[in-house]
Image: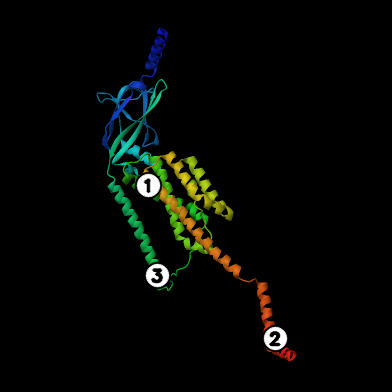
Amino acid sequence: MRNYKVAVITVFFIVMVFIPQVFALNVTCSPKVNVHEKVRCTVNGIGTAKIYLVAVDGIEIGHSRVWFFSETDDFIRESPSGVSLPIGIEFIPWSLLYRAVKNAFWTDSEYQWALYNRVNYFTFRFEFDNGTVEDVTIPIYIEGDAISEIKEILKAAIAFVSIISILVSIAYIWGRRKGEVPKNQDTSLPSRLSFIFLPFMLVEFYPAMAALFIYFSGSLSTLKGDANILWSIFVLLLWNFEVLSYRSAMLKARKKPITGIEWIPASIIRWSGLSFAVGLIGTVVLFAVSGKKSLNELFRRIAFPASLIWLIILTYTLSPNTILLLMLLVFSVWHVLLISGIESVIRAEEDVVLIENKHQRSPEVEELIQKFDRIIWEMKKDGFYERLSGGERNEIT
C-alpha cells in the first residue's frame, strides 16, 4: 500500500514538473473596448510559450501576432522560443474583425462593422516550449460606429434602384413615342444555366445582406455557421424569384428547369475551397441530368424529404442561429412547394388533354362515319326509303 502511494505521488510530481502551464494558465482581458483601441490582457502562468491570436468568433484568421509587455509596461521582444509567463499582451481588434469577416463572407469589402456592438470571442493559442498546445477563448465586447456604414449601404442601394428606375422609365417613354409599347407576352422559358449562374452574377449583394442580418440579430452562435446558412437563404431567394418570374413560361412550355433539390449542393459552395468545387460540380450535374423526364420526376418527388434531412444535417454541422434556421426552413419549403405547384398545374392540364383525346374519334372512324352519312343522304335523295315503304304496303294488301 505504501509503494502504491509513492507511485501516485511520483506520477503527480512528474506531471506538475513537465506540464505546469496546463493547470496554471489564466487569461484576463478588458471586458469592453472600442474597435480602434488596444485591448489589454494579462496572462498568468508558468513556463515559456509562443502566443498567437488564431480565431475570432470561430473563424480562423491565421497566426496573428500580439504585443508583449512586462508588469512595468516595458515592451518585450519575443524570443525564438517564446516569452516567459506571466506577461501582458495587447492587440487592436479592428484588423482581426476584418480578417474574420473576410474569411466568413469570402469578400475583400470592409464589412467588419457587422461584429460591432456585441460580444466577440477571441481565441489565443499558447505553444509551450515542451510541445504542449492550449487554446483559450476570451469574450470581449467591441464597440464601433456601424450606423454610418449601414447608411452608406442604404444610400448605394437607393442610388442603384433609382438609376434602374430612371433607365426603365426612359425606355418606356421612348417606346411610347415610337409607337412600340411592349405587349404583355409570355417570356421564353429560362435555361438551366441561368439558374446555375444567377447566384454568382449577384454574389456581391450577398456580403451586404449577410452583414446587415448579423449586425441586427445581436447574439449569434458561430459566425461561420451563420454565414453559410445566409448563403443558402440567398440562393433560395434568387431561385424562388426566378421561378415566380418565369412561372407562366414554365406552364406554357410544360417544363421545369429546376426540381427543388439543386439548392442542397449549392448550399455548401462557400464553406471552403474543397466544398466550393464539390458544391459547384454537384449543382451543375443535378441541373444537367434533370433534363431527362424520369430523373426530373424523381428529383421532384424526393426534394421535400431530402430538404428536411439536409436541414437536420446543417443544424448539427453548423449550429446556426435559431432565427436563421427557421428562415432557411421557410424558404426551402416554399421553394419545393413552389415547384410542386407548377408541376401539379402541368399535370392537371395534361390530364384534361388526355380526357379530351379519349373522347375524340380517330381519323379512320371519322372518315367511315362520313361515308355512311353520304350514302344515307344519297339514298334519301333518290327516294329509296319512299319506294321501300310503298313496296311494303303492297305486300301487306
Mark 3: secondary structure: helix
Label 1, residues with CA under 10 Å away: few <14, some 14-19, many ≥20:
many
Quarter of the image where the C terminus is located: bottom right
| Numbered disc 1: secondary structure | helix
Mark 3 burial class by Cα count in 10 Å: few <14, some 14-19, many 20+: few
Residue 112 at x, y = what percent?
A: 34, 42
Instruction: Pick whichever, 82 or 34, lies toward us.
Output: 34
Label 3 and label 1: CA atoms lie apart by 38 Å
The front one of 126 and 37 is 126
Where does label 2 land, which residue? Answer: 379
Name the residue at 41% across, 70% down: 175
Q: Nearer the viewer, mark 3 or mark 1?
A: 1
Q: Looking at the picture, how far across and down is residue 118, in whole percent?
A: 30, 40
Quarter of the rendering containing residue 170:
bottom left
Q: Residue at x 58, y 56 (%)?
A: 293
User: Which kind of residue does numbered mark 2 sit on?
Assistant: Met
The residue wearing badge 1 is 210
Q: CA distance from mark 2 to mark 1?
A: 85 Å
Reply above or below: 276 against 27. below
Instruction: Report whether 180 appears left or right of 285.
Output: left
Pointer 3 residue: 174
Question: Residue 22 at x, y = what percent?
Answer: 37, 22
Going from the N terminus, do you reach mark 3 or mark 2 first? 3
